[in-house]
């Protein structure tokens, strides 16, 4: 399958920003691929807020803000709306946040979700891959 638009979950983005090995390598390559216009990369406003919170706690708010500015310059940010919450509340997903991310990705016609947490994305209508699995499809 040829992927033209990907939804990145927070763990993949944090791997890249925080250089969390061994996963950072795959996130870096994935983002480099997107910069070469081979694939459009999206995330949600919720993911951005979560990343800012996590990095602020692990480092500080100045570093977090710098990272968020980088993210919004290279990723397309999808809105987080009430229908995603409705979906999550009524879905069979065991993880509420993953259900929200799935709802946002499918509503915006993303071809796949890239995450390290594929086990929580059961019975989806689009592929859910790790960054490494995605890169192996190229």
Image: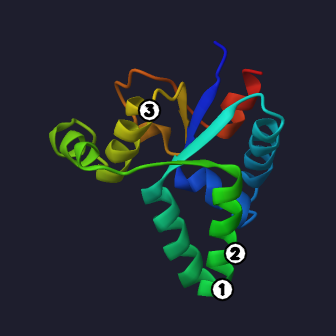
Q: Which residue is mark 1?
A: 62
Callout 2 environment at 10 Å: few (<14), some (14 to 19), or many (20+)? few
For image coordinates 36% across by 51% down, the residue present is 80
**Residue 26 bears which disc, if any?**
none
Image spot of residue 32 (x, y percent): 82, 43
Q: Residue at x 59, y 76 (%)?
A: 55
Q: Dot 3 surroundings within 10 Å: few (below 14), some, or many (20 or more)?
A: some
Q: Residue at x 65, y 85 (%)?
A: 62
Is the C-beta separation of discs 2 and 1 under 8 Å? Answer: yes
Residue 94 x/y as whole percent: 27, 45
Q: Secondary structure at mark 3?
A: loop
- Left or right, 75 with respect to 78, comes to right
Query: Viewer-proximal residue, 94 or 109?
Result: 109
**Vertical relation: 48 (above or below) 87:** below
Q: Are marks 3 and 2 in contact (CB under 8 Å)?
A: no
Mark 3–mark 2 distance (CA, rounded to whole Å)? 27 Å
Residue 66 got which mark? 2
Sequence-first tag of 3 and 2: 2
Give the residue pinned by disc 3: 108
Rendered-image quadrant of the C terminus = top right
């Amino acid at each position: 399958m040829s992927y033209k638009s990907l939804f990145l979950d927070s763990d993949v983005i944090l791997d890249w920003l925080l250089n969390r090995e061994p996963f950072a390598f795959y996130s870096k390559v994935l983002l480099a691929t997107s910069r070469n216009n081979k694939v459009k990369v999206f995330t949600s406003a919720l993911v951005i807020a979560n990343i800012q919170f996590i990095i602020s706690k692990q480092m500080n708010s100045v570093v977090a803000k710098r990272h968020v500015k980088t993210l919004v310059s290279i990723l397309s940010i999808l809105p987080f709306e009430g229908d995603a919450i409705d979906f999550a509340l009524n879905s069979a997903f065991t993880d509420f946040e993953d259900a929200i991310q799935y709802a946002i990705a499918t509503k915006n016609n993303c071809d796949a979700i890239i995450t390290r947490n594929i086990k929580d994305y059961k019975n989806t209508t689009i592929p859910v891959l790790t960054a490494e699995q995605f890169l192996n499809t190229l």
